[in-house]
Structures are given as structure tokens and as C-alpha cells.
Image (cartoon, rainbow, N blue to C red):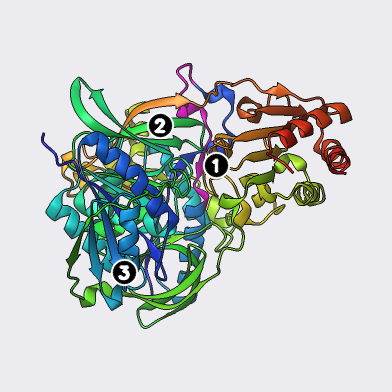
Amino acid sequence: MNFKNEVWVFIEQRGGKPADVSFELLCKGNKLAEIMGGVLKAIVIGSNTDEITKQTFTYGADETIVFDHPSLKNFRTLPYAKILQNLVKEQTPRIVLFGATIIGRDLAPRVASHTKSGLTADCTDLQISDVKYLNQNHSKLLLQIRPAFGGNIIATIITPDVPTQMATVREGVMELFPLEKPKEGKITKLEYKPDPVDDLVQIIKQHREENKVNLKAAPVIVAGGYGLGTKDNFRLVEELAHTIGAEVAGSRAAVDAGFVTPDRQVGQTGVTVRPKLYIAIGISGAIQHRAGMKDSNKIIAINTDPEAPIFDIAHYGIVGDATQVIPQFIEVYKHKLK
Amino acid sequence: MYNSIVLVKQVPDTANISGKVMKDDGTVNRSKLPAIFNYEDKVSLELALQIKERYGGKVIAITMGPPRASDILRECLYMGADEVYLISDRKFAGADTLATSYVLSEAIKQIGNYHFIFAGRQAIDGDTAQVGPQTAEKLNVPQITYTEEIIDLKDNKIQIKRKIDGGYEIVESKLPVLLTVLKDVVTPRPFSTKRVMAYKGAKSLIDLEKLTEENSLLYIDKLVHEYKERGLYINTLTTDDMKIEAERCGIKGSPTKVYKVESVVLASNGHKNIEATKNGLGELIDQLLNDHILG
């Protein structure tokens, strides 16, 4: 079968602000399109979208398709899905990428269902490769790589037989690198005609809090896990972070146990970070956690269990009880700085 | 009065995977994992039951799965579901979310007469959160995902508080609508002892067919009739009972294919062991200071 080789990225915005993940996906999409010998298109849906549209070229878009209408200001499933599915049906892109955000995970399945496309959720890596599957050769398929089965296995999913391959990708998984010179891309403005059917669901009110914690920008992170045992012990993590000028983070188990707030969760369902130094304390290192921190420049693991998988990706390992190691670390550190 | 259809799923208990259930090739041996009621689906059943108690109506739970998935349908009856449906056929095996939502939507069309479709946000075995929205799309009804709270329900309109990235929003939808529900919305009620006694013998068509295979004196039509009379029949839908296009279900109807699975074995890149002593930590800190990672 002959398919087009366009890569599309849905550009998500919240209250007029673009989501980081959409630009991360443009950067990845740009690479994928290059390998496929195709083009990268950004799809912007919203109201007053000029600024966002301009930014898409900084991240590699060759063409940006814009639907701008006052009633599209905030994301609503029905009008957004209708716009995208009609566009996909008309133009049959080879790949469509969405952020695995609440918006992306709401929108992508609806569009995939309508267009009968394959959709893989929460990918941690995307590659292009020739594939032999069931004795058939497929050229330049999208390998959609994701943890499965509660993170116990890594699965590579392919969509060999339908024209459009769709995937959602978590924020922070792909690297963000603006081009030095933005592409001189084309802007295509298309019209959205409001339809009463699109208004079955109305937004009454929205409340958003600015994220005060910015783990992604922190050069040093001290993260604690369930292994710390109690909230009191977790304070040691905070104390160490305070001493060395780091941000505090936690594993999902630590968040679930109430040791630390959800906005500080690192891992597959939290934030993905790449700090200069990541200190993992009482974190066993389940794949979901590692997915969010394995690309840190240096990793120190502190754990009582010498077999804990976290040591496999650590650069420095300390086998010991955190309640003893942390105070010692703080004491020695303070002494050295004197 | 509002009728609800609740989508439930039996899932392997992926939270408690140990080495014992891993096959040599690194894949998971599903049959060795305990099968449980996907918790968020149980939460959505509870929500449907609360609507029924407050406004009247019926709660119907449906699941697509292998014959043993009737386990969780009995649990739905124990909690208070009025009717349950097992949607099961070998032809449905290997379905991805697209093929699953196709079969579910056809079953829902057959059952009909609903104001709400409820589902958990996602199932713990796949974590995709796709089947809800894809079922809604096929039925051409709106969806509200990530439901946190039902604020108001009147005049065929519902107001919902739902999670959004960085906060929440309140939306209003006309009915019918499909809702996917987060795990903290309500706490599922325990099984009613009375209902457990009443429904523990409930059986699906497939369960009853097994009985007839084991005992030549039993006739399937008679058995089904008998179980229906006693209110113990788990409605069973196969491809024969629905308007199903064979090429849209099971592996055939699934555009996504698992190409490769690998167990998560990490190649250790060899870390440096640091003694948990003042000297050991001192050397480490010196190194970090020298490398300008700290300080």
C-alpha cells in the first residue's frame, strides 16, 4: 500500500497557552518526518492563535493548519474531535501525535475511533523502522514503544495495515530543542462552522492553578520513595534538598502514601526530569519511576536493599538506611562548605 | 428516572506481579495472575447505583471478556446491579481498544434505553483510557472523561466537575452521555450478604453449556429457561446475538498489533559503591563539588 508520509502534531493550548508537550512532539515529529522523507504539520485549534502558530515554526513545523474561532477558545471534545477527524479523513496523514495529557487522552481516542486509525497510549519512545510482520514487509512504520502490564514489560506496538498511525506521548519524554532559525513554514487557515451538535457539552466554569513547582527546570532533585516509611522520615528528604539547594520530588508510591504532593511526582504518570543530579532515596526503581528520571546526568541511589533495580541505573550507590545516611550526608556537606 | 449502563472489566492484578508469573521469554503469564474487578469500574458502578437510588431507573453492567469474566458480573449483582451482560466470543479475542469499543457499542445498541454510560477512567492492564471515548464516538454520544463529582442532575442535563490539566472545570451535558470516572469519586459499597446469597449461583450461557456437557440429562434451552425464571441468568451475547461485522472485531478489527515485548531487565551500567560512612560520603561530595554538580 502507498501511504502519504506526513507527520501531524496536535498543538494543545490551555487558556491560550501552548502545552510544552506539543512543542516537544514537534521536535520529535520533525525527526520522524526527516527519516520518512515527509513533512511535519502542526494543527492549531483555538481562538487568537497567531502567537502559538508562529511558535510552531520554531520547533520545526513545515506547515501549520489553523482553525481559529471564538467558540474554540477552550478545549471541548465534540468540536475539536469533529475538526480533526474531518481533516484526517480528507488528508490521510501517516502519523498523528498528541500529548498524553487529559486533553490528548480525551481527544485522540475519539478521533482514532472515527477514522478507524490505530492509537497507542502513553508512548515513551517513537522510532521509524522497516518491519517484517507476519511475513509481510512494511516500510517505515512507526514503532510505538510503551510500558505495559503495570510497567512490567515494554511493548512495541505497530499499526501495519491502516493509513494513519496515532499515538499519545507523555509530557517531558521527548526533548525540547528550538531551531536556531525558525522554518519558513506555510500557514493554512481553515474555517470552522459552529454546529449546535458541537454544543451538547458546555463549559460552565474553569479553574486552573499555575504550577508553582517546576521540577523540569531544577538542576538538582532529591526524590524520596515509599521506602522511607513515614512522613516524618520524608522530612529528611526535604531537609537534604534544602541543604544542597535542590527541589523535592517523590515516587508515585510516596505520593499515594501522602508523603509528598502530586505535583512533585516523578515518573511515567508524573513529570519526566533530566537534572544534573538526581538523588533517589528509598525508591526501589520500578520502571514507571525510572521512565521519568533515567536520563538524569548523574544519579545517586540510597537504598537498604542492595538488589533494588534503582542501582542498575545509578552512577553512585549507597546501601544503607536513609534515616542514618541523610543526616550524615548533610553534616559532611555542611562541613565541606565551611 | 435514569437508566445506566456500566462498562466493567476483569483485569489481571498487575499491581502484584512477581517473578513467578513471568514466562521465560519475558512476557507475563496472564493465567497465573489473579483476576480482579478493575477498581475504577467498580467506582463507576457505585456512582450509577447512587443515581438509581436517588432518581429511580435501572443499572445494567456489561463486560466483554472470556467466560470467567462472569465472576465480576456476579459481583455487580452483589452490589446491586439489576441486570448484567457477558459479551463473549472467541472471535472477540485479541481485540485492541478500537475493536473492543466496536463490540461494546453494538451490545449497548442492542440493550438500548440508557441515559448514562459509565466506565472507569482506564483499566490497570492496559492503562489506555481509550475504550470509553471510543465507545461514545461509535454511539455518537458526548463524553465527559476524568469525572470527579456529579454536581447536579435535572431536566435531562447533568453538571459534572471534571479534572483538567492544572485544575478542574464544571461542564454541563445533555443526556445521554458517557462518563469516565476517577477512582476517588465515591467508595464502592461492600457486597450485600442478602444479594450474595441470592446471586452466587448466577450463570452465563457459557457456564450452563458446560453443565450440559458434563451431564447428558441436561438440556441447554431448558436450563436457560430455568435460570431466567429464577433470576439467575447472566445475559450472554455472542456474535450470533448482535449485528456484528466479523472483520471489525477481535484481532482482525484491531489496527494496532503487538510487535515485540521485552521484560524490563536493565543492563546495569555499573555504579560506584559508596560506603555509608563519613569518609565515603565525603569523597562523593568532593567529587560532586569538583564536577560543579553541587555547590
The residue that label 1 is drawn on is: A292
Looking at the rendered structure, which numbered label has been put on residue A155? 2
Q: Residues within 10 Å of mark 3 (few under 14, many from 20)?
A: some
Instruction: Assess whether residue A223 is covered by the magenta stretch.
Output: no
State how far apart marks 2 and 3 are (Cα): 37 Å
Sequence-wise, which precedes: disc 2 or disc 3?
3
- Label 2 resides on the chain identified as A
Q: Is residue A335 depicted above or below A85 in this figure?
A: above
Instruction: Assess whether residue B29 is covered by the magenta stretch.
Output: yes
- Label 3 resides on the chain identified as A
Instruction: State yes or no: discs 1 and 2 in contact (Cβ < 8 Å).
Output: no
Q: SS for tag 2?
A: strand
Task: Residue at 23%, 46% (x, y): give it.
Answer: A117
The residue that label 3 is drawn on is: A49
Q: Position of residue A109 (x, y in %)?
A: 31, 53
State how far apart marks 3 and 1 are (Cα): 31 Å
Q: Nearer the viewer, mark 1 or mark 2?
A: 1
Residue most extreme to the front: A181
Q: Residues within 10 Å of mark 1 (few under 14, many from 20)?
A: many
Callout 2 amino acid:
Ala
Q: Nearer the viewer, mark 3 or mark 1?
A: 3
Tell me which corner region of the image, top left, top right, bottom left or bottom right, holds residue B253: top left
Task: Residue at 59%, 46% (x, y): give it.
Answer: A266
Which one is nearer the viewer's eye here, A132 or B105? A132
Callout 1 amino acid:
Gly
